[in-house]
Image (spheres, grey):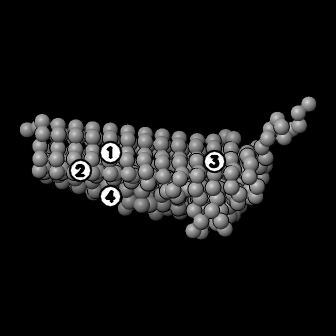
Amino acid sequence: MKSLSQIEARTPIPTAPFTVLQSGSYYLTTNIVVSSGDAVTISANNVTLDLNGFSISSTAPSAAGMGINLGATRRQTNITILNGFITGSVTNDNSGNYGGGGFSYGIGYSGVNFPRNVRVSGVSVSGCLVDGINVHSTSTMVQSCSVTTAGGYGILAQIVSDSTAVDCAGTAAIYASQTAHNCSASNIGTGYGLFTYAANNCYGNASSNDGINALTANNCTGASTDGTGVRSLIAANCYGQSFYGTGLSATIAIGCYGDSFYGDGLSVVTANSCYGNSSAGTAQSITNKYNMP
């Protein structure tokens, strides 16, 4: 006969607030709710938290606290968070003003001791006053996650893949310090849609800044109202569109298309097999052209 700990070598979390003080594997057994503050605080290293398909929420009338706090007193390392929902009641009044109850952060950390070696997968966050998922930009990964309505960053990590962040208003809807792959990001504030070192197969949209801002962009689409649709040092097979700004701006562009109503369609130093269009501005501003009229 096996003991229960041998069969299910995990610790259940039946209620909140809950603080993880020891290394190990933890899981929700039901939806958990707090009336104020943080729901789950991780104060140990080497922790896996499985939301198990359940939700973490807050009934706080004014948004405060975090759904999951990765700690403040010391740097937490080797943390995995999986499979569930973090829900607040913050809304956007369609003018970029965020307010309401619930959480300030879906997943975050407090203090200067930012976490490392963190992976967040399969988590959906909605209705946060500040950031949806912020695990810092060093040795962190967010994959297959979604954030809807966050007054700050939607997602901030080193690597972000197969994820979406919409209705955000921070510096970037998705900020990936290294790479973003198969991501979609939308910023209604003054920040970027998607900001990263290398973007692959991504979509970014922004109101007043760049839809996508990346050192290298491959197979990406970016759109902006006042800013640049796609801005990159090297862009390949990308499409950028803007109403008042530049459709696509790059030092080197290969197989790209830029379109703008009032601004430059395409603004590139060296372009190969590219096309630019503008209704009321300059279709193409290119220094060196190859394989094009």
Residue found 13% across the figure and 49% down from its top: 286
Counting other residues with Cα less than 10 Å from the Cα at mark 3, is it few (<14), some (14-19), or many (20 or more)? Answer: some
Relative to residue 12, is residue 64 drawn left or right? left
For badge 2, the amino acid type reads: Ala
Residue 80: mark in rendering: 3
Residue 217: mark in rendering: 1
- C-alpha distance separating marks 2 and 1: 10 Å
- Residue 228's place in the image compared with 36, above or below, is above
Which residue is most to the left?
Answer: 293
- C-alpha distance separating marks 4 and 2: 15 Å
Q: Secondary structure at mark 2?
A: strand
Residue found 32% across the figure and 51% down from its top: 215
Front one among 254 and 152: 254
Residue 250: mark in rendering: 2
Q: Mark 2 touching mark 1, by CB under 8 A?
A: yes
Counting other residues with Cα less than 10 Å from the Cα at mark 1, is it few (<14), some (14-19), or many (20 or more)? Answer: many
Q: Is residue 229 visible?
A: no
What residue does disc 4 label?
209
Q: Secondary structure at mark 1?
A: strand
Q: Is residue 232 visible?
A: yes
Mark closest to the chain's N terminus, 4 or 3 = 3
Q: Quadrant of the N terminus?
A: top right
Of labels 4 and 3, the one closer to you: 3
Mark closest to the chain's N terminus, 3 or 1 = 3
Q: Mark 4 touching mark 2, by CB under 8 A?
A: no
For badge 3, the amino acid type reads: Thr
Q: Could you tell me residue 256's position as x and y percent?
A: 23, 40
- C-alpha distance separating marks 3 and 1: 29 Å
Q: Mark 4 touching mark 1, by CB under 8 A?
A: no
Of labels 4 and 1, the one closer to you: 1
